[in-house]
């Protein structure tokens, strides 16, 4: 058996990594319905993963320290049927912090998945939707 030179091995590994990255191209879209200086902002991030799934992240951005609750509804429809995911809970955020409320990966794309996020903190209520 002939030994493979280290440079050739590195080239093969790099090529395989590039091919794997090309197979899982992602595109991220965000929905955020509040101004940057708002004391409470919501954000939905959808990232297409390859051609058949989408990762959704729900975020709360706090301009001031606050405690609140959230409700997240995700709807997906495709050839395999329909699904709905409902998640809710409480969160605490320091001033200037971004809180990761939850995430889900579902079948479909950012075009076939819809989501609604509602945040409540004291008298504040904010909502984000995708699509808008």
Image (tube, rainbow, N blue to C red):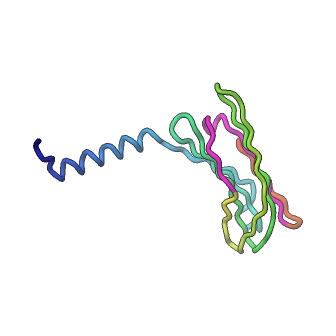
Q: Residue furthest right?
A: 123
User: Is 63 drawn above or below residue 51 in the view shown?
Assistant: below
Nearer to me, 73 or 42 = 73
Q: Is residue 101 visible?
A: yes
Q: Is residue 132 visible?
A: no
Task: Give the residue displayed 65% in from the left and 27% down from the top.
Answer: 80
Nearer to me, 47 or 9 = 9
User: Is 7 drawn above or below residue 97 in the view shown?
Assistant: above
x, y percentage for residue 43?
A: 69, 55
In magenta stretch: residue 26:
no
Relative horizontal placement of residue 21, taking residue 84 as reference (left or right):
left
Task: Give the residue displayed 58% in from the left and 46% down from the top.
Answer: 47
x, y percentage for residue 9?
A: 22, 48
Relative horizontal placement of residue 72, taking residue 18 as reference (left or right):
right
Q: Residue furthest left?
A: 2
x, y percentage for residue 12?
A: 25, 45
Task: Give the residue displayed 47% in from the left and 41% down from the top.
Answer: 24
Task: Give the residue displayed 60% in from the left and 37% down from the top.
Answer: 109
Which residues are the magenta region? 102-121
Q: Quadrant of the N terminus?
A: top left
User: Is 93 drawn above or below residue 5 in the view shown?
Assistant: below
Q: Residue furthest top?
A: 79
Magenta stretch: helix, strand or loop mostly: strand
């Amino acid at each position: 058996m002939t030994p493979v030179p280290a440079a050739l091995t590195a080239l093969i590994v790099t090529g395989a990594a590039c091919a794997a990255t090309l197979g899982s191209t992602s595109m991220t879209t965000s929905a955020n319905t509040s101004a940057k200086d708002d004391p409470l902002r919501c954000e939905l991030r959808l990232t297409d993963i390859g051609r058949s799934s989408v990762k959704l992240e729900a975020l709360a951005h706090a301009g001031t320290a606050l405690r609140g609750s959230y409700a997240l509804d995700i709807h997906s429809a495709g050839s395999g049927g329909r699904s709905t995911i409902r998640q809710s809970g409480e969160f605490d955020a320091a001033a200037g912090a971004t809180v990761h409320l939850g995430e889900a990966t579902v079948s479909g794309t950012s075009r076939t998945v819809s989501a609604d996020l509602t945040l409540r903190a004291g008298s504040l209520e904010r909502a984000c939707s995708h699509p808008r």
